Amino acid sequence: MRVVTVSPVARLAVLLVTGLVLLGGSAATGASTVPPPQARPRLASLAPRGAAGPLTRAQAATAAQSCAAYAAAAGWANNGYYGGNLVTAVAVCVAESGGNPAVYYCDGTGSDGIYPPVSCPGGSYDRGLWQLNSKAQAGVTDACAFRPRCNANAAYAISAAGASFSPWATYGSTAYGHYLGAAQAAVRGLDSGALASAVFGVCATRSAPAPGAAVVVGACGRSLASQQWTVAAGTLRAGPLCLAAGSGGLPAVTMGTCDGDPGQTWTAAGPGELKDGRTGQCLHDPGASRAAGTPLTLSACLSTRGRTWWLP
């Protein structure tokens, strides 16, 4: 169970950003390279019932836990209760695939199958966790679509960093609504994932896996190891390192060896603000920048986009 929390009041309403440009960023070991989604048609899946069909309560709970882990790693923001992006993404995943990364739905026959191989007359089929259609999202290969992390990253891009779920058939048919409860429970149980900003598409990123390394702006939607944080005992951890308020000439926000220093303790200070225990200031993306590599800073706590961060 996480110790650092942001109250329901602190979950800001979704700030829809038109013309979103996903940021560039450095590659990392284990990261999945995702091609950009196809511009038209604006679809992800075609089957309104999803590939999984009806699920029992227990099946839905298990599926939601799997979907939540991949969705949180990709960077969907935990910015609401039933209407939050992360919860909605998980519910859509459960409705589409039942949490099975190998399932596909053949549009020509109306039947399900398990990859590999794919047997589908006509060649149009929905694939993997978020059921990415082979024709509407032809730029996403089967090799990506049937790998859960790559599927989640591609789905994140298709959703315009969480701003829209209209490409999914189960969202349009409201079938996803049956799984919102399971999705919310799974999200509440998370203790790790990306630290997403209210600047859509931005995640807090470690510039290097070493003490003193700056924490910078990075593009979400890649499930990078450098963007994964574990919330524990008031800290945001990455192995033996903790997010820390810098000191002694270091950048304002760095990684430090976890040693209980007050600057490594972060608490909710308002609607989505994260205040450090040493300075009493809040984590800040100056200028609400989307430029990869921009160092994060500390500043007075205010309810602005650049100072709003959602824990997984």
Image: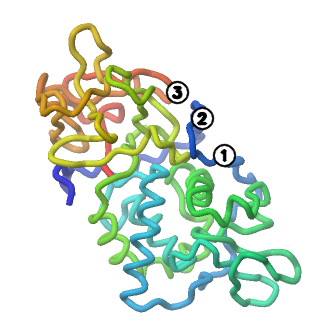
* Image position of 66 (left or right of 311): right
Dot 3: element? loop
Tell which circle, 3 or 1, labels the residue nearer the N-terminal end.
Answer: 1
Give how far across and how far down residue 19 sits, in percent: 60, 40
Q: Return the residue at label 2.
A: 27
Label 2 Cα crowd, 10 Å radius (few <14 / some 14-19 / many 20+):
few
Give how far across and how far down residue 204 sits, in percent: 40, 35
**Splitting the image into 4 quarters, where does residue 43 fall?**
bottom right
Q: Residue at x 88, y 79 (%)?
A: 122
Q: Are marks 2 and 1 in contact (CB under 8 Å)?
A: yes
Label 3 Cα crowd, 10 Å radius (few <14 / some 14-19 / many 20+):
some
Q: Quadrant of the N terminus?
A: bottom left
User: In the rendered image of this protein, does residue 201 appear above or below residue 264?
Assistant: below
Q: Say what amino acid the circle numbered 2 marks.
A: Ala
Q: Say what amino acid the circle numbered 3 marks.
A: Ala
Judged from this view, the residue extending furthest toward the front is: 240
Q: How is the image coloured?
A: rainbow
Q: Are marks 3 and 2 in contact (CB under 8 Å)?
A: no
For discs 3 and 2, the disc positioned in front in the rendered view: 2
Q: Say what amino acid the circle numbered 1 marks.
A: Thr
Residue 33 numbered tag: 1
Distance of mark 2 from mark 1, alpha carbons?
Answer: 9 Å
Dot 1: element? loop
Distance of mark 3 from mark 2, alpha carbons?
Answer: 12 Å
